[in-house]
Image (cartoon, rainbow, N blue to C red):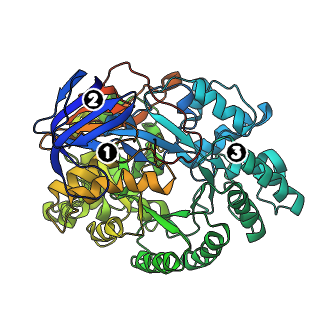
Amino acid sequence: MHDLIVRGGTIVDGTGGPPYHGDVAVTDGLITEVGPSVEGRARRVIDAAGLLVTPGFVDIHTHYDGQATWDPLLTPSCWHGVTTVVMGNCGVGFAPVRASEREWLIGLMEGVEDIPGTALHAGIRWGWESFPEYLDFLDAAPHALDVGTQVPHGAVRAYVMGERGADNQPAAPDDISAMARLVREGLDAGALGFSTSRTIMHMAVDGRPVPGTFAAEDELFGLGDALRAAGVGVFELAPAGVMGEDLDAPEREMAWMRRLAARTGRPVCFALSQNHQASQDWRRMLELSAEAEAEGAVVRPQVHARTVSLLLGLSTLHPFMFVPSWQEVAGRPVPAQVALLSDPHRRQRLVAEMAAMGDDPIVVGFMSPTRVFPMGDPPDYEPEPSSSVAAQAAREGVSPWEKLYDLLLSGEGRELLNSPVLNYADGSLDPTYEMLASPVTAFGLGDGGAHVGQTCDASSTTFMLTHWVRDRRRGPRLPLELAVHKITGATADLYGLGDRGRLLAGLKADLNLIDFDRLQLRRPELVEDLPGGARRLVQRADGYVATVNAGEVIMAEGEDTGARPGRLIRGARAACN
């Protein structure tokens, strides 16, 4: 007697092999049989005729470090087929920590990852100091999804070095030894790796770069040696130059990453995007990563599935916030703002002030009308250049700022505009396609739980299937089996999670049942559901008939079933017996 049989679906098993028609049987949270026809009875049978059956998605780049203490669902990831999340990325997290440092770590997370400090203050249920104690706390908390985490450089540096560490002063040999002991302690307790950030774009709310941004090689290699000694873990980082802020940095970063991977025998996983300033540099990084792998050093670029964007709107952020006359409107509810902004004299004044800003780097770099597009419904993440605000304005004979102003007011002020910051330098997602299709890259950078006032990219798993497999019109698509492999087996393998990511007998019974024809992203929306009533952007999807974790249905048609089979992942593991 099986606990569950999923019958008659199109199985895409996460190995990269072709889809086939068959059944999946589950007993005691494990897959017990997969094949064209599973015999026997089950306590529950799900008819999967006409549905895709895939492994649960493994998202290796999230920032639920605080949210995991109060939200058992880890929204919005649970709405997008994810059954395993890895957090503690980019060098930020909440352990180790002394009680006196809690507020500072909240400010670090708020500054780097745009998670409201008010929500973190109200929501985090503190109950730890050391990293192992943090894992114990997570282990005791109910979750629908499985949770793994990494030791964050920022927290470790501040814990060992105090203000010197927070201020990015050089680490002395004794500091490095003490930090390495904490990293090893975390790995021995079950951490999946160590993370750091080296981009000056990552700053705390006090304006200081993340601790470790300027760490010298003796510090980086000393901490990497903790992974070598433990024989487990990924060294994850946001490298210098990732946003195009330093055009000479990528190759410098690659040089030490290759040496670190060779020395430690552990994977080094770094964020890679296409930027406007050096639109072809990503190709060189793929070449160098392939060279490293051929030499036996795993240096794995982690790439995003679509544009890295800001969503502009009256309720989020927009360029008019930076001109003087906006202060007459700021802080009011959106309906009141729409009423005030509908005044033609105020419109004329704000547009004139906006035009007078000229080459302001924030506006030119992040909100230029030449690279701002209507979001659309369903949302369009590969917009035609001819649909930009500037292009529409030219056709209508108005200035780009007039057109952007009017779009912000449309839909009673609820309109969202897509402003691609990365991965759109050539007016398409062709470079993103090449990065995703490359055998040396890992899928990630969705930032689940983070950047909640700017965007919502935790939905990227859904986008992999809708846009890249089914809907793309302006270039090549990805085969279904490759797209599924990238978000299941490949991400699980990178982090040593051999017990999941594939629909094979003996592995963990994490599954998605997907109505592929109906699978669709909804428009992002602003909600006020964080602790303390703080706001965030979320995005749901249609078409996930069921998501199963450890044999239990946790989501049915996008709704919580109340099941909480999620567990803390303690360290890498081989396939289940």
Q: How many marks?
A: 3
* Callouts 3 and 1 close, C-beta under 8 Å: no
> Looking at the picture, which amino acid does disc 3 mark?
Asp
Q: Position of residue 409 (x, y in %)?
A: 27, 41
Horizontal and vertical percent position of residue 123? 57, 25
Between 558 and 535, which is closer to the camera in this rendering? 558
Mark 1 or mark 2: whose residue is earlier in sequence: 1
* Horizontal relation, residue 396 to residue 108: left or right: left
Query: Residue 558 has which mark?
Result: 2
Mark 3 Cα within 10 Å, few/some/many (few <14, many 20+)?
some
Number of other residues with Cα within 10 Å of mark 1, as a class: few under 14, some 14 to 19, many 20 or more: many
Residue type highlighted by circle 2 = Gly
Left or right: 162, with 38 as reference point? right
Q: Nearer the viewer, residue 266 or 304?
A: 266
Residue 569 in the image: state x and y as whole percent. 54, 38
Q: Is residue 538 visible?
A: yes
- Tell me what residue is drawn at x 82 percent, y 59 percent: 176
Task: State left or right for residue 284 relative to residue 162.
Answer: left
Q: Using the rendered view, name the quadrant where residue 77 is placed.
A: top left
Residue 503 is tagged as 1
Depth order, front residue of 420/406: 420
